[in-house]
Amino acid sequence: MATKVTVKFRMQEGCEDLEPKKAHHNDAAFDLRAKEDVDLVVGRSMIVPTGLFIELPVGFEAQVRPRSGLAIKHDLTLTNSPGTIDAGYRGEVGIIMYNHGKETFHIKRGERIAQMVICELPEVDMVSADELSETKRGGGGFGSTGKH
């Protein structure tokens, strides 16, 4: 069974109806909603406010990810996907959205625009080394393991 963690949040005044919620109990992510109507212009990134402020425990992050329905139906994505919210951040959660489509997309207040996953982070020690171990892949990247 997974560890249960408490994440505190508050909503900006007048945004109580926009609380992050999971559509189904077993879903991985909480839906995030737009705080206001926004016209998302083609070929531009915009920050869409949510009215949400969170307090993550130390050792956790929130990852903000695109919604698949908006991606496939309207060519919308998040510019910095996944976006990371650090435990020390207390500002409003803003969603950096990008419109790859052919026309302006009208986001309505309350519309689900992104999803947020809460992730536990391991404590990591970065250690300088003169050599790294050999692997079959080696330094191959950027499609080196794909089709030839």
Image (cartoon, rainbow, N blue to C red):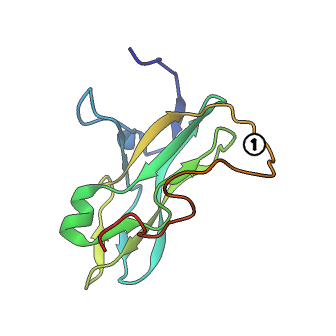
Residue closer to the observer: 137 or 82: 137
Q: In this image, 118 relative to 37: left or right? A: right
Query: Which one is in front, 10 or 25?
Result: 25
Quick check: 25 left or right of 79? left
At x 47%, y 72%, the residue is: 46
State the residue at coordinates (43%, 68%).
Answer: 144
The quarter of the rendered structure image containing the C terminus is: bottom left
Tell me if residue 7 comes above or below residue 49 in the rendering: above
Left/right placement of residue 57 relative to residue 114 reads right
Above or below, 122 relative to 52: above
Q: Nearer the viewer, residue 40 or 135?
A: 135
**Quadrant placement of the N terminus:** top left
Seen in the picture, residue 61 relative to 109 is either above or below; the reply is above
Q: Residues within 10 Å of mark 1 (few under 14, many from 20)?
A: few
The reply to whether residue 65 is visible in this rendering is: yes
Is there any visible trace of residue 12 in the rendered image?
Answer: no
Question: Residue 68, relative to residue 28: is it above or below?
Answer: below
Label 1: which residue? 126
Q: Residue at x 25, y 85 (%)?
A: 102
Measured as percent of width and height from the top left, residue 36 is found at 40, 60
Residue drawn at x 55%, y 42% as measured from the top left: 53
Amino acid type for the residue under numbered disc 1? Met
Q: Position of residue 100 (x, y in %)?
A: 33, 78
Residue situated in front as seen by the camera: 92 or 117: 117
Give residue 56's quadrant in the image.
top right
